[in-house]
Each structure stands twice: as structure tokens, then as C-alpha cells.
Amino acid sequence: MEALSYRGVEKNFGEVKAVRPLDLDIPQGAIFGLLGPNGAGKSTLIRMTMGIYLPDQGGISVLGQPRNQISSSILGYLPEERGLYTKMKVGELLRFFACLRGLSTAEASRRASKGLKRVGLEKWENNKVDELSKGMQQKIQLLVAIQHIPKIAILDEPFSGLDPVNTELFMDMLDEAVREGMTVVLSTHQMEQVEKLCHSIALVNEGRVVLQGDVGDIRKRYGARAVKVEFSDGAALSPADFESLAEQALIHPNEARFFLRPSVHAGKILKRLLDMGVKVSKFEEAQASMHDIFVKVVTGGDPGGQPPAPTGSAREGRKGDGHAN
């Protein structure tokens, strides 16, 4: 039995096809990455899962049951846009949401105190939410989503506004939740966290799943033909300079990654750089990062046979615009 199962799910907003007929299974007891560029349909899919939107077509199952037949306490939700009552006191707010999920007043108080201590905010229990920083409010959002110990927690951009220390704290908390039996669906643009946390992923683009599977298997699939180069004077380089050698070249002022064509040896990339007068400081064959794979699939299509996605920037800000995010 899957944690979440989608069959033929479709959602339109007028003429905008936010989610096209989509099939997807999310396994239990692990962290699953739901990835995609802005406007890909991720947030729409999440909102249908939470019952905020209804699918136009198809069905969603939660732990084998139709979505409309499950208890709300089974799910936890951290929305991308904060859903906190900013004039409530922190402890009061946590207890309020816990009671909405079916906990007794006493148990809600116990879990609120325990959660605040876990995230280092116990001294802020009697402060109003709007007195907290953005990162502190994000900690409260996470507690609201998981304090009632749901079977499935759906977290939309949970690392937004966090510094590196608190990002590590969140990752530790999610690992703990999974060890205790929770399934976590993580929607994020931070590919480093995806590599560290997710067991498997689905990449959505234009409302369709264009890549899915085990993170390790996906990285191996792409990584065998990836080359990473560091240099000090590559500002004038262009992907067109390597078109005959690389399926795709991701070039920045001080480094580049090349996805080699099947018949090309990595040394040819190095020779081309040296012939162009580039001062190379580091050259290595490297396993592709999830960042690289995200960019490659979204802008150039999956070499395993998936249809190419429309060209666009994968460096857009995290905020989606409109219902189709």
C-alpha cells in the first residue's frame, strides 16, 4: 500500500492546464521529493492532496483510501505561504492547531512544550507570532505540521528563511519523524537538501511527471557522463563552444559542468578548454548533482526517452505565481 497514489489526476484553471492527467505513487515510511520549476503544478497537486482543491478528473488515495474518506489527522501540512495567526501567542497557536487535529487539551499542551524546546523557542511561548523572525516562524510552521504525528506530512518549501544551522535542525527532525514511521513529502527547490534527505523523487514539469525514481539510481544514470571543471578565466565561454562534445554545458564564471555525448572522452573537454586558453585549476569526472539533473531535464529533456520540457530558467525565485505553481 502506497502512502499516496494519484491516478489520472487533472486540474485546470480556465485555459491553464495546471496538472495534466498524472499518475504517481509515493511510498510509505520515507522522504519523497516532489520537484519541479515554478509553475510546474507541484503546489496545485499538493493542494488537491490536502483537499483545498478538488481534481477535475482522476482520483487520489491516501493509505489506500479515497482522499474524501480519510480523517484530517492523517495528514500534516506546511504551506509555502505561511498559515499562522500572527496575533496569537506561540504556545496558544500550537495548542489550537493540535486540538483541531483531535488531541486533548492536556496532550496538546505537552506536545507544544516539547516541540518548542526541540526547536529552541521555549522562551518565546508567550510571545505573539508576529514578534518572531521569519526563520522562527518557519519553525512554528513545522511544529504545526508534525506535532500531532500525522501518518503523512506534506511540506512545501520548508527550508524557506532558514539559516544553515536551522536547516540542519529541520533535516534532523525530518529524519527522526521518518524513523518513527512518518512519510514526508518534500517540495523544495534546494537540491542539496534533496540529495541529503530524499530516498526517491518525482520531477514535475508542465503538469506532468517527467522523471521519477530512486535518487541514487537517477544520479548514477546521469553521473557516469558528467565532467566538472574549475577555472579562473572562463567568463567568455559559451555552451556553443562545446556543442559537438557535450549534450549540455552548464557554464558559470568560475566553474562548469558538461554532460558528455556518448562517444566523447572527457579528455576532449579538457583539450578544448586548454586550446581556448582557459586556465584550468580542477578537472574531474563527477556524478551529476540533483541540481544538474533538474536543470538538464527541465531545459533539455530526459535522455532516457522522456519528452523535452520548454526552455526556461531554473534559477527563478522560489515564489510561484498564480494557481499553476
Image (cartoon, rainbow, N blue to C red):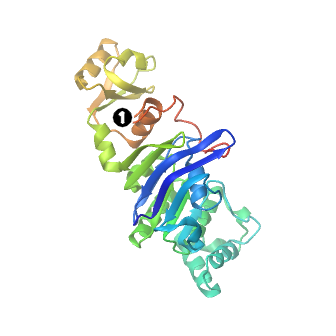
The residue at 73%/62% (across/down) is: 130
Q: Is residue 168 above or below residue 102?
A: above
Taking the view exactly as shown, the residue that stands out farthest to the right is: 87
Q: What kind of element bears circle 1?
A: loop
**Residue labelled with disc 1:** 305
Q: Is residue 19 above or below residue 263?
A: below
Horizontally, is 180 left or right of 163 in the view?
left
For this rendering, which residue is in front, 184 or 190? 184
Residue 232, by quadrant, is top left
Q: Residue 249: percent from the left, percent from the top? A: 39, 25
Q: Which quadrant of the figure contains the N terminus? A: bottom left
Q: Residue 40: percent from the left, percent from the top? A: 55, 42
| Observer able to see residue 160 | no
Q: Is residue 139 above or below residue 180?
A: above
Q: Is residue 74 above or below residue 260?
A: below
Residue 274, by quadrant, is top left
Q: Amino acid at mark 1?
A: Gly
| Observer able to see residue 288 | yes
Q: Which quadrant of the figure contains the C terminus? A: top right
The residue at 39%/50% (across/down) is: 195
Taking the view exactly as shown, the residue that stands out farthest to the front is: 57
Q: Residue 55: percent from the left, percent from the top? A: 60, 54
Residue 203, by quadrant, is top left
Q: Residue 3: percent from the left, percent from the top? A: 44, 64
